[in-house]
């Protein structure tokens, strides 16, 4: 049987990496959240939104916790 990957909510990430909860919340709500921070967004059956970071994307948070500003993505040509 396949094991489920752990999902981390903003509070857990804030505690894990010692980042202010407000900073984590801003990153989760950012338009770049999926690409820059590895945030996955799902719609629940009631229409609300569930955001989390799977364990495989935690490396985005470890790389640069003092990141400030808009990200610049390199295009693969």
Image (cartoon, grey):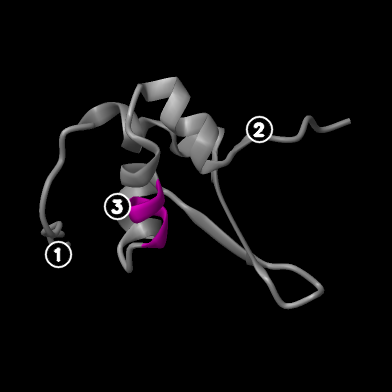
**Left or right: residue 4 compared with residue 57:** right
Classified by dominant secondary structure, the portion drawn in magenta counts as: helix
**Quadrant assignment, res 19:** top left
In this figure, which residue is indicated by the disc labeled 3?
Answer: 36
Within 10 Å of disc 1 (Cα), the crowding (few <14, some 14-19, many 20+) is few
Q: Pick whichever, 64 or 3, lies toward us.
A: 64
Q: CA distance from mark 3 to mark 1?
A: 14 Å
Where 63 sits versus 28, above or below? above
Q: Nearer the viewer, mark 2 or mark 1?
A: 2
Image quarter of the N terminus: top right
Which region shows up in magenta?
Answer: 25-29
* Kind of element beneath mark 3: helix
Res 6 label = 2
Q: Earlier in the sequence, mark 2 or mark 3?
A: 2
Mark 3 and mark 1 in contact? Answer it, CB < 8 Å: no
* Kind of element beneath mark 1: loop
The picture places residue 54, in percent across and down from the top left corner, at: 56, 40
Q: CA distance from mark 2 to mark 3?
A: 19 Å
Image quarter of the C terminus: bottom left
Mark 2 and mark 1 in contact? Answer it, CB < 8 Å: no
The picture places residue 61, in percent across and down from the top left corner, at: 33, 34
* Kind of element beneath mark 2: loop
Q: Pick whichever, 26 or 54, lies toward us.
A: 26
In this figure, which residue is indicated by the disc labeled 1?
Answer: 75
**Left or right: residue 8 compared with residue 15:** right
Mark 2 and mark 3 in contact? Answer it, CB < 8 Å: no
**Quadrant assignment, res 17:** top left
**Quadrant assignment, res 48:** bottom right
The picture places residue 41, in percent across and down from the top left corner, at: 56, 62
Where 14 sits versus 47, above or below? above
């Amino acid at each position: 049987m396949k094991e489920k990957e752990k999902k981390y909510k903003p509070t857990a990430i804030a505690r894990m990496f010692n980042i202010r909860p407000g900073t984590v919340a801003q990153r989760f709500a950012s338009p770049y959240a999926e690409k820059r921070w590895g945030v996955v967004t799902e719609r629940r059956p009631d229409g609300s939104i569930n955001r989390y970071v799977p364990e495989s994307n935690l490396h985005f948070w470890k790389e640069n916790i003092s990141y400030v500003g808009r990200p610049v993505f390199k295009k693969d040509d």
